[in-house]
Image: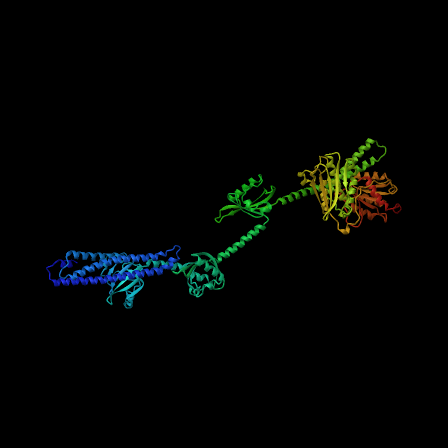
Amino acid sequence: MSQLQKSASDPSKPSSPGAGGRTAVSDRLEQFERRQSELWRLTFFLLLVLAVVFALVSWDTIRSLTHRYEALPIGLVVLVVLFGLYAWKRTQEISELRGLVRGIEQRDSVPPNEKQLDQLFDVISRSQQGYRDLIDSFDDILLAVSLDGQIRAANRSFADLVGATFPQIIGHPLSEFVQEGTGDDGELAKRAMPRFLERRVWNGIVQIRLKGRNSINYFDCVAHAMLRGDEVHGITVLARDITALRKNEARFTELFESLHEGIYIATPDDRLIDANPALARMLGYDSKEELLSRTFADLLPDAEQRRALREQVDNQAVVQGREITLTRKDGQPLVCLNTAGAVRDTSGRVVRYHGALMDITERREMERRLYQQQEFARRLIDSFPDLIFVVDSTGHYTFVSPRVKDILGYEPEEMQNLEFGGRTHMEDRPALLSLFGEMLAGRQTFASLEVRVRNKQGEWRRLRCHFSPLFSESGKIDGVVISGRDVTELKRLEEQLIQAEKLAAMGQMLAGVAHELNNPLTAILGVTELLRDSEGLQDNTKRQLELTHRQARRAARIVQNLLEFSRPAAPQKKPIDVNTIIERTLQLQDHSLRRNNVQVDFQPQPDLPAVIGDANQLIQVFLNLISNAEHAIREVRETGRIQIRIGRIGAHISVTVQDDGVGVAQEALPKLFDPFYTTKRPGGGTGLGLSICMSIVREHGGSVDVETLPAGGSAFTVYLPAAPDEVSGAPVDGAAPAAEPTPAADILKGRSILVLDDEESIRMLLEEGLSAYGMRVDCAANSREALELIRNGAYDVALCDVNLSPGGQGPSGRETAQQIAAYSRGAAKPEVIFMTGDLVEDNGGGDHIRQLQKPFRISDVLVVLREVLAARPVEKLR
């Protein structure tokens, strides 16, 4: 440049040398212009290639993004336009420079002045700096290399890559800075050079290693031949560093191959173009290639599932977690969760599908088993007779079984809103909360407690609860499981059983006491009867004897009731007309009813069927009910009315005894039929009447109901099963009271009676009482004395005590009777009448055994003797 300036500024030099200098400058400018043109062509070509490659590579990605980035290619076009404007400006500068040079060439006679030369070199300097700035602004590497590998030009990116300055780079071989990463010492480049010279363009990925570094770099390169005329004299290389991209691709490939989830890529025509090994293993194929030989339709044969899946993927950016069922190689189903998407071209057409599959077959199987276990547990809990509660550490219900509705009346949701222990009896609550605390503290692992809980209706239910701790997954106690069984009825039955056992023990005791009382009562009744019938007694004495006799009969009735309650006799059931039973009962109670001014309204119903029962026991039932009604009236008024109605309800005959007396209090109704419970005043009753009535009616297969009437009084209804039609017409069996004997002494006179009883008072009573009627009476205290008397004489009747040997030291009365029959001579065998303090029962056999129930009166004995002796003439016995 300085030489040029000097040449232009020295006018003393000859013109020919000046012309030669100008010619040299012109040549240099033409050479510069050619190089500039090549550079601009290369630059525009590279920009065009970059824009096209970017558009092709990035368009699918841009279209598949959630946000729309279609404006990016437009921005690239704008950038190219701006670059064109910048290049046009630089071209104008070159045109200006060319004009100056030509002007110098045309003025050979007039050499350029210093100002023109300064202007020329200023334009050249600015143009070169502009090109340098443009090339250095590229992020990609730009090189100009000769055919022998010498670097002619490089941009800032290459200098930064190799860590050298431009003077250290320009003119030096490229091999000083980089070498091929394959380690073949440039053999690959030598083999590829002839083909490049032929085609004059090459693009591809180059693997290189920087000198002094161990790392491998990857560059995506585009190489073009630099031409001089038609001859290649150099190479321009544009290289983009894709090392990070290749590393990411390597990591993606590694991830793709190592994922446990199956990855697939398929075309719209169901052809598989790629899959990872995990998918091949999931579907049971030996290799990925074997899997890729199948179509997606082979893996998902259900056309409806394929249609629905494709429709969903086509309409959504990404389909996540859709459950599909694939078919394995062995034909077994494979349940998967599919996450899929679609890749589209610039026109929006789907070019391929890709997705990830997660095998959930085992999870579905576990869910199925878990559901079965939960369903089993739910059904087990629903069918379990006990309540199940789960209470957390704060005292809130977390689970309540449906049985709570049946036992406590609450819905499970209602129960969960209640406070734990809030419905428990206040006496049981402290023990409940204390046990709950001990369970949470871990001091007990199992415990039981019986508590009273108020149900939704306000009634108390008794629950027998079992407590167990509930552990979390970490082994910590975070709640208590409580199972509660309703033992209300069981407790009631236990109490009734205990009461029954007490009553049984009491009955045994009462039976023994009653048996012992019957003997003295028999003596009292007999003696008072004999004295009362004696002549010459004063009226005052007779009244006292009558009082004594009446009280003895009362005591006898009490003892009889005790015996019937403790050990009721087996009823002798026959067809019975209920109308007749009620009429006979009213006859027995007629005197008392008239004396107390109580009217009875009874209307017989003759068309009703009979009932099967024991007449004596049913008379006892109705007699008790009528007597109670009479007493209830007498407590509130002087006169009253008893209404008795008989009817038929279904298969039962009903008898209702209604009075207008004091009635029954509501609180007394549940206990009215309990033994020894009475609503009468002290001394007015024993409390056994209704209990015996209930026992008799139940023995007959019926029941007794009671209600308090709103207008006052009460109504007792007895229900008895109606007899079948074929037995309804049978004769009625009634129990008429014993009649006083008539003075037909001719039957009794001269008869011989043997009395066998270990009670002296009974022997004395019978001896004196029967002797007064002309009979010969011999007495024996034991079987030995009785047999001795039988050997010495004959007897018409033997009155024998059944319990002759209560201590078990000798034969009983029945055994002694058999011995008497064996010792008797021929036809003079005496008739045996048993005397007993127990209840008289039917022997169940064909023989008719006569029995006298203690306590008895002399008149009762005479009636039985007359019946027996009427069939035995005196002549036959003499």
Quick check: 843 above or below 589? below
Task: State the scheme by which the image is colored.
Answer: rainbow
Q: Is residue 781 left or right of residue 97?
A: right
Q: Residue 798: x and y, percent?
A: 82, 44
Name the one closer to the observer, 368 or 692.
368
Say whether residue 159 is visible.
no
Q: Quadrant of residue 238?
A: bottom left
Q: Residue 440: x and y, percent?
A: 51, 44
The number of callouts visible is 0
Say whether residue 588 is visible.
yes
Q: Is residue 152 left or right of residue 257?
A: left
Name the residue at the left extreme: 12
Name the one closer to the observer, 223 or 453.
223
Q: Residue at x 63, y 45 (%)?
A: 489
Image quadrant holding the N terminus, namely bottom left
Q: Residue at x 49, y 61 (%)?
A: 304
Name the one closer to the observer, 300 or 60.
60
Q: Residue 2: x and y, percent?
A: 15, 58
Q: Is residue 756 left or right of residue 439?
A: right
Name the one closer to the observer, 313 or 424.
313
Q: Quadrant of residue 313?
A: bottom left
Q: Residue 249: x and y, percent?
A: 36, 59
